[in-house]
Amino acid sequence: MIMRGLILVIAGMLTVPNALGVEALSTQELMSHCEKYYDKKAREDRVFCTRYIQGFIDGAVATDERVTRNVIGEYGEEETFSQRAARTRIGNRLKRYGSSVYADFCLGDPVPLEEVVEHVVQDAVDPDRVAANPLARDLVYQTVREHYPCPDGD
């Protein structure tokens, strides 16, 4: 009986996604690079800061696009009038603001990456904001949501 339980525990551990093993970047570590963003001599730090933020946005957009396609695919099977209305609204919002609308930020027209990075760097100067967002991804997410909100009711 104990052996069977041990086998189940080991099997359960093997099915845990590998993503749980990836250490999340802390806000402090990101800021150790981003605080040098305006120093032209700190090229590696500036590139690290910029690419992390760009990767966050690209990842959010790619994920949201995939989720949106899956949702629309499910609606297409057998949809009610209200589901069709929701799907139509989804399509209009997607066309206007892009797939990040479901992540509660809308970059809409191409926004210069430098502008987004500068918002993150400025927001990270606030010690309360950093304390509230110990993971870099949370700080970046909060920043893009606050600086690039989606219009209501579109």
Image: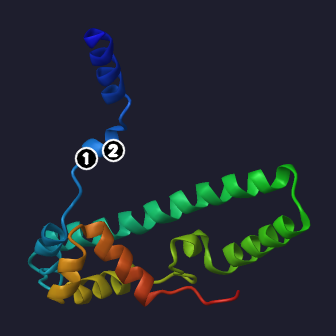
Which residue is located at x 57 percent, y 71 percent? 102
- Residue at 70% across, 75% down: 95
The C terminus appears in which quarter of the rendering? bottom right
Q: Residues within 10 Å of mark 2 (few under 14, many from 20)?
A: few
Q: Name the kind of residue labelled 1 in the image.
A: Val
Residue 19, numbered circle = 2
Is the C-beta separation of discs 1 and 2 under 8 Å? yes
- Residue 76: x and y in percent read 83, 54
Q: Name the secondary structure under disc 2.
A: helix
Residue 31 located left or right of residue 1: left
Q: Residues within 10 Å of mark 1 (few under 14, many from 20)?
A: few
- Which mark identifies residue 91? none
Residue at the extreme front: 1
Measuring 25% from the left and 69% from the top, which residue is drawn there?
Answer: 136
Residue 49: image quadrant is: bottom left
- The amino acid beneath tag 2 is Ala
Q: Which residue is at the front of the view, 52 or 93?
A: 93
Q: CA distance from mark 1 to mark 2?
A: 5 Å
Task: Identify the image quadrant of residue 125.
Answer: bottom left
The residue lying toward the viewer, choosing from 43 and 31, is 31
Give residue 22's mark. 1
Quarter in which the N terminus is drawn = top left
> Looking at the image, is 62 positioned above or below residue 81?
above
| Colouring of the image | rainbow
Q: Give x and y (percent) for residue 30.
A: 18, 70
Residue at the limit of the structure toward the right, as seen here: 81
* Secondary element at tag 1: loop
Q: Residue at x 52, y 57 (%)?
A: 63
Front-lying residue, 8 or 116? 8
